[in-house]
Image (cartoon, rainbow, N blue to C red):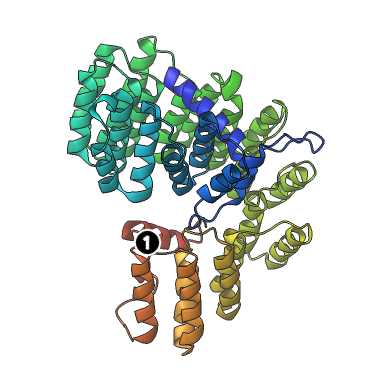
């Protein structure tokens, strides 16, 4: 259970720190929190193509000092904000420029960042450079995460064996291996590892949830129910997340009544510091079942906790949109607008997207105008929702103009919407307007919205007749085919959720 508690604690730390980069708190406007001026500088340096270390260099040149604890804090904030390239730059600056000696924890963090930013090969090269004396269990744990993330099973198994040799029985590392076995369908190995964990007494709530989800993925409801009953009979202390996971299993199987029963049971275990995140999760789960009454009931309980986070409004709005309760969503948006301290475009984007999908163009445009008139900015998804409306209604010329705004508003290295972009490219190619098509492609390349390989494929597509292919499928390098096929099916049903 300690892992579950620490996981939620990290989540709350992430929210608090992440508010500087992508606001999550809706606090009374009269209570602004003091902000470290260096953190503010780093928060503004969003473009991943521009090194964030420029801000650190300038800070030092101004005669100021940066402590090791500050740098670690910046790395944590950047990681939690998914600015991994910048986090890695700060990690490297810490040792290269400031000559700080790295602890095993610092090394483990850097290893993880290198794997995510540059890939497994670079991570292994960095690991090879680590002195033997520094290759402690924390570093092996990070290496295991790298192999698990890239689904390198044999190397992961060799690494977990190294961890065993330390004689330190850490549930975290074993859970990583357990999840990898589940992802790769190695259920016999998963059961064997779980038995080992039980013998060592290191099973926790996360272990249980991995096993429950494995049963769900194999549609083995009987196995899941037997496992859950046995776990309860053994006197294992379960939590709200365990029963919420069981609810997901039933929901995947189409058993809404049993899923509802598990969610009600989950509520009985919600208390203390996890209450806020638990209620946010349950909002979306009750919406998935279709229980509007429970969504509003949980929302009242959530608000009774005190101040409402932006993340709570996101959960509530997404739930009401899913339930097709547009009027209710409008009321929640008005409530948020009346009291937020930090503007978060993701919140109004929920309604902009819903309006466009339902054909309520005037409402979408009115909300967009309201945001712009207030001095706030739209992001790529805001404009992309409009482009989706125009594409679906054969107003492709309008979609082209809006798509340009979307591309400019996307954060660099975001994933551009393949449906809208391909529709615009094919429309312009059909008109013989290759110049405008290439302008859009060059803009995407400048913003790093897709790879150089995809750019070259689409560039060639614009100039050459390819009757057996489409712009959409030429984007497969950046959007794996299985995901494209799934999204294409969803798009045909009018159910695709747009995302940055």
Pinpoint residue 184: horizontal percent, then vertical percent.
24, 40
Q: What residue is shown at x 62% (from left), y 46% (from top)?
A: 41
Q: Is residue 104 left or right of residue 360?
A: left
Pinpoint residue 117: horizontal percent, then vertical percent.
38, 48
Pinpoint residue 346: horizontal percent, then vertical percent.
62, 50
For label 1, count other residues whose C-alpha is less than 10 Å away and answer few (under 14), some (14-19) or many (20+). some
Work out whether 103 lies above or below 350.
Answer: above
Element marked by disc 1? loop
Position of the N terminus, as image quadrant, is top left
Q: Is residue 210 left or right of residue 32?
A: left
Kindly indicate the quadrant of the structure image that contains residue 396.
bottom right
The residue identified by callout 1 is 478
Q: Nearer the viewer, residue 131 or 232?
A: 131
Q: Is residue 178 visible?
A: no
Tell which residue pokes out farthest to the right in this image.
Answer: 30
Kindly indicate the quadrant of the structure image that contains residue 209.
top left
Q: What residue is shown at x 43% (from left), y 22% (from top)?
A: 3
Pinpoint residue 404: horizontal percent, then vertical percent.
57, 72
């Amino acid at each position: 259970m300690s892992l579950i508690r620490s996981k939620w604690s990290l989540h709350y730390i992430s929210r608090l720190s992440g508010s500087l980069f992508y606001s999550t708190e809706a606090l009374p406007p009269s209570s602004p929190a003091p902000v470290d001026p260096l953190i503010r500088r780093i928060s503004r340096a969003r473009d991943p193509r521009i090194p964030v270390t420029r801000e650190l260099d300038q800070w030092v040149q101004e005669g100021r000092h940066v402590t090791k604890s500050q740098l670690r804090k910046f790395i944590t904030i950047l990681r939690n904000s998914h600015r991994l390239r910048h986090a890695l730059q700060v990690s490297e600056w810490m040792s290269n420029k400031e000559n700080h000696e790295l602890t095993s924890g610092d090394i483990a963090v850097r290893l993880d960042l290198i794997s995510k930013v540059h890939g497994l090969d670079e991570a292994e090269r960095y690991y090879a450079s680590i002195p033997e004396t520094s290759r402690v269990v924390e570093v092996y744990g990070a290496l295991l995460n790298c192999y698990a993330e890239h689904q390198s099973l044999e190397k992961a198994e060799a690494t977990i064996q190294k961890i065993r040799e330390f004689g330190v029985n850490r549930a975290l590392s074993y859970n990583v291996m357990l999840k990898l076995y589940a992802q790769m369908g190695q259920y016999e190995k998963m059961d064997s590892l779980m038995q080992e964990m039980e013998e060592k007494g290191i099973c926790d709530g996360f272990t249980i949830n991995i096993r429950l989800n494995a049963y769900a993925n194999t549609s083995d409801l009987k196995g899941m129910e037997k496992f859950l009953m046995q776990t309860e009979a053994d006197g294992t202390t379960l939590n709200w997340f365990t029963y919420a996971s069981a609810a997901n299993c039933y929901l995947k199987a189409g058993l809404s009544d049993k899923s509802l029963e598990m969610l009600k049971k989950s509520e009985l275990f919600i208390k203390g510091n996890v209450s806020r995140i638990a209620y946010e999760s349950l909002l979306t789960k009750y919406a998935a079942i279709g229980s509007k009454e429970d969504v509003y009931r949980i929302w009242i309980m959530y608000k009774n906790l005190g101040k409402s986070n932006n993340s709570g409004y996101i959960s509530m709005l997404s739930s009401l949109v899913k339930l097709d309760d547009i009027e209710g969503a409008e009321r929640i948006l008005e409530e948020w607008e009346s009291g937020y301290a930090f503007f978060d475009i993701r919140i109004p984007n929920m309604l902009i997207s819903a309006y466009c999908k339902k054909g309520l163009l005037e409402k979408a445009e009115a909300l967009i105008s309201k945001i712009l008139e207030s001095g706030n900015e739209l992001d790529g998804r805001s404009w992309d929702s409009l482009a989706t409306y125009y594409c679906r209604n054969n107003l492709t010329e309008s979609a082209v103009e809006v798509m340009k705004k979307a591309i400019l508003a996307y954060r660099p290295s975001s994933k551009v919407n393949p449906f809208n972009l391909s529709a615009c490219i094919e429309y312009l190619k059909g008109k013989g307007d290759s110049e405008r098509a290439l302008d859009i492609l060059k803009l995407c390349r400048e913003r790093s919205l897709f790879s150089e390989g995809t750019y070259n494929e689409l560039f060639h597509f614009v100039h050459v007749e390819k009757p057996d292919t489409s712009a959409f499928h030429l984007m497969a390098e950046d959007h794996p085919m299985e995901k494209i096929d799934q999204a294409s099916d969803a798009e045909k049903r009018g159910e695709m959720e747009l995302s940055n």
